Image (tube, rainbow, N blue to C red):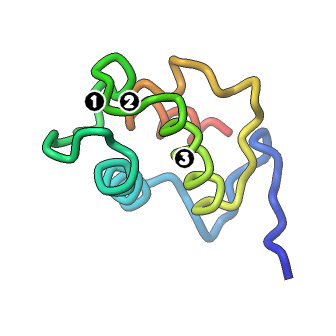
Amino acid sequence: MTTPHVSAHAAIPDAQTVDDSFGDRLTEHISMHVALDGNVTIERETNLLLTGLVDSLGVMMIIEWIESDLGISINAGDVVLENFLTVEAMLDFVGTQ
């Protein structure tokens, strides 16, 4: 059985909310599985793209993880620099969907 995906324009399912726990999991996932330099501490305000910690493939990996973790689909048109510069920007973006 496949997990249904909802549009990124729909509300996030009640079982998963964008809270501190999600932000912590997202930061940890980026640090452990996506960041190109594992020696850098990633904070919610760290500019991931301009520092080179995350490249375009990394952004796609982050999007896939968010979609899987929250059970949503992110529209390609929403994959813009300002939504994925920092963990905080990602949380703001996902929280408005």
Could you say where residue 31 lies in the image, as x and y percent from the top left? 29, 50
- 72 to 1, vertically: above or below: above
Could you say where residue 48 lies in the image, as x and y percent from the top left? 34, 28
Q: Residues within 10 Å of mark 1 (few under 14, many from 20)?
A: few
Asked if the residue under mark 3 is in contact with the one under mark 2, i.e. CB atoms within 8 Å, the reply is no
Q: Which mark is residue 61?
A: 3
Of tags 1 and 3, the one toward the viewer is 3
Q: Which residue is mark 1?
A: 45
Q: Quadrant of the C terminus?
A: top right
Of tags 2 and 3, the one toward the viewer is 3
Q: Which mark is residue 70?
A: none
Q: Quadrant of the N terminus?
A: bottom right
Assign a secondary structure to mark 1. loop
First in sequence: mark 1 or mark 3?
A: 1
Q: Would residue 38 appear left or right of 35 to someone viewing this image?
A: left
Q: Which residue is mark 2?
A: 86
Asked if the residue under mark 2 is in contact with the one under mark 1, i.e. CB atoms within 8 Å, the reply is yes
- 79 to 97, vertically: above or below: above
Taking the spot 69% from the left edge, 61% from the top edge, the residue there is: 71
Could you say where residue 76 lies in the image, as x and y percent from the top left? 75, 30
- Disc 1 versus disc 2: distance between alpha carbons? 6 Å
Query: What residue type is disc 2 on?
Result: Thr
